[in-house]
Amino acid sequence: MLPQLASTLLVSFTSLLGSKNSGAPKDPAAPKRPPGAFFIFMEDFRKSFKENFPENKSVSMVGKAGGDKWKSMSHADKVPYFEKAQSRKAEYAKALEAYQKRVIVDMIIEKPAESEKSSSEVHDNAEQEASS
């Protein structure tokens, strides 16, 4: 009961926040997520489709034909694409781990030691000492 209530509140709260642009901006140096099996299939399919139909420039036609072909393929025909997707996912995991370590190290190196007082308190103390 409580987890359902929490998830409902979270969904309603996020809908109040508004657009997709809420949240932290993405780091352009971060590794990109790997494509799934279907998109890897589409990379190969686009090449063969362009060779067979060089006059066709319609992106939607290529996507529709690729989707129809993917649906008609057996699982055995799809296995090589699933394997490629798994290997790309493993490469992404390694790249992401290296990126996260690099970001943490950069944060530690670049973060200056902050005093306990705010900058306004520091300036106020300096003014009081100067006036004394």
Image (cartoon, rainbow, N blue to C red):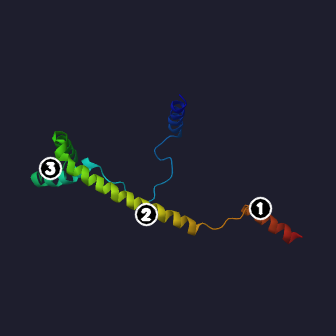
Above/below status of 85 relative to 116: above
Choose the circle earlier in sequence order: 2 or 3.
3
Q: Comparing marks 2 and 3, which lies closer to the viewer?
A: 2
Residue 10 location (% of width, % of height): 53, 36
Residue under the point 46% across and 55% down? 26
Amino acid at the residue labelled 3: Asn
Extreme residue toward the left, this view: 52
Q: Residue beneath label 3, please?
A: 56
Q: Amino acid at mark 1?
A: Glu
Of labels 2 and 1, the one closer to you: 2
Kindly state the secondary structure of the residue where label 1 is placed.
helix
What residue does disc 2 label? 98
Q: Residue sitting at 46 percent across and 44 percent down?
A: 20
Cα gap from disc 2 to disc 3, whole angstroms: 42 Å
Residue 65's mark? Answer: none
Relative side of 9 to 98, left or right: right
Disc marking residue 121: 1
Q: CA distance from mark 2 to mark 1?
A: 40 Å
Q: Residues within 10 Å of mark 2 (few under 14, many from 20)?
A: few
Instruction: Please tell me which residue lies in front, 40 or 60.
Output: 40
